[in-house]
Amino acid sequence: MKSFGYIFRLTFVLLVITVVVAGLLGFVNYLTEDKIAENTAKKAQEAMQSVLPAENYEEISLTKEHTDSGISEAFRCESGYVVRVSVNGFGGAVDMMVGIDQACAVTGISVVSHTETASLGANCTRADWQAQFIGADGELSVDKDGGSIDSLTGATVTSRAVIAGVNAALTFVKEVQG
């Protein structure tokens, strides 16, 4: 049996290594957090431009009811609205931008970030799959539920989540328009 001193020394060495590595990780995070925030904001701005191009976007204030439905940001521009929605997919949150014109028709969707399964739910970022939302103006559902949106093969949960986000955005815009 090992002596108490040996076990204590081994534990202390492991503790020191853990503290040093955690400190280094925290320091690197501190050094890169501004760049990460800048890249995240740039990606969100690019997503807004891709779903509904505009010169200026005016932020719309949200109520608790809106944020409870997954809407985190909403913007108005001369040609319509851009709504940022975060919904729960199979692997976690799917954060996306939905563009909606003045006639309450979807102009595009762009997935900003997700944690879905590679080659299954991650296919929600494919342009050809997202294109089927363009022009939609009513309550959407997947083909398996009798709707018009083709679900992603092996990723029905993700498909339903994205559709729920688009539906929430459409409902929000119709409410804002009165």
Image (cartoon, grey):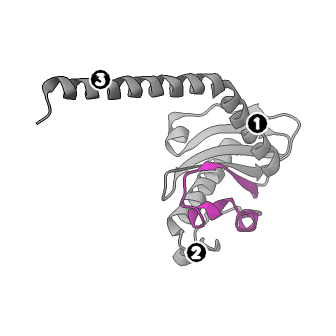
Name the residue nearer the viewer: 138 or 4: 4
If the image is split into quadrants, where does the N terminus sit? top left
Q: CA distance from mark 3 to mark 2?
A: 51 Å
Q: Which residues are magenta?
A: 104-133
Residue 131 point in image, percent of width and height: 75, 65
SS assignment at label 3: helix
Cβ–Cβ under 8 Å for marks 3 and 2: no
* Residue receiving disc 1: 42
Which residue occupies 57% across, 63% down? 121
Q: How far apart are labels 3 and 1 at the CA level? A: 44 Å
Label 3 belongs to which residue? 12
Mark 3–mark 1 CB contact (< 8 Å): no
Query: Is 156 above or below relative to 14?
Result: below
* Helix, strand or loop at mark 1: helix
**Type of amino acid under label 2:** Thr
Q: Is residue 105 magenta?
A: yes
Does residue 5 appear anywhere in the picture? yes
Image coords of residue 96 (percent x, y): 65, 49
Question: In this figure, which residue is indicated by the disc labeled 2?
Answer: 153
> Disc 2 vs disc 1: Cβ atoms closer than 8 Å?
no
- What's the distance in space between the residues labelled 2 and 1, CA to CA? 31 Å
Q: Can you give x and y, in whole percent of width and height, for residue 129 in the image?
A: 70, 67
Q: Quadrant of the C terminus?
A: top right
Residue 28 shown left or right of residue 101 in the figure: left
